[in-house]
Image: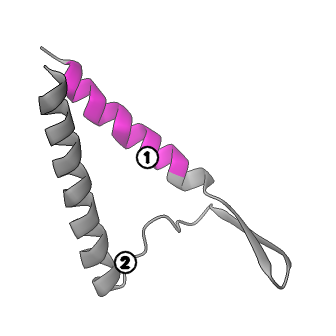
Amino acid sequence: MNFGKLLIYAGLSLAALGVLSIAASKLGIRFFRLPGDIVWKPTENSTIYFPIVTSIILSILLTLILSLFNRR
């Protein structure tokens, strides 16, 4: 696969992810704030967010997607 096609597929995937994210927020579905993610507020003006579960799920999804593209 040449680099131009890869960029087109990546752009279309990002656009689809953006539309999905907007539609989900309209329905009240929260992405990237899953149970198991850690939110720590050490002071009133600061927040530290550790997306542990979100990172694991994104890793699994990206592994599955990339394994589909690597099959020939």
Image quadrant containing the C terminus: top left
Relative placement, left or right, of 20 versus 51 is: left
The crowd level at tag 1 (other Cα within 10 Å; few <14, some 14-19, many 20+) is few
Q: Position of residue 70 (x, y in %)?
A: 22, 19
**What residue is at 12 percent from the left and 31 percent from the top?**
5
State how far apart marks 2 and 1 are (Cα).
17 Å
* SS at badge 2: loop
> Would you say residue 65 sits in the magenta stretch?
yes
Q: Are marks 2 and 1 in contact (CB under 8 Å)?
A: no
* SS at badge 1: helix
**What residue is at 51 percent from the left and 54 percent from the top?**
54
Q: Position of residue 31 (x, y in %)?
A: 42, 68
Range of residues picked out in magenta = 55-70
**Residue carrying label 2:** 29
Counting residues from the start of the chain, the first of labels 2 and 1 encountered is 2
Residue 38: numbered disc: none
**Residue carrying label 1:** 58
Residue 18 location, quadrant: bottom left
Residue type marked 2: Ile
The crowd level at tag 2 (other Cα within 10 Å; few <14, some 14-19, many 20+) is few
Vertical comparison of 44 with 55: above or below: below
Residue type marked 1: Leu
Image quadrant containing the N terminus: top left
Magenta: predominant secondary structure element?
helix
Residue 2 location, quadrant: top left
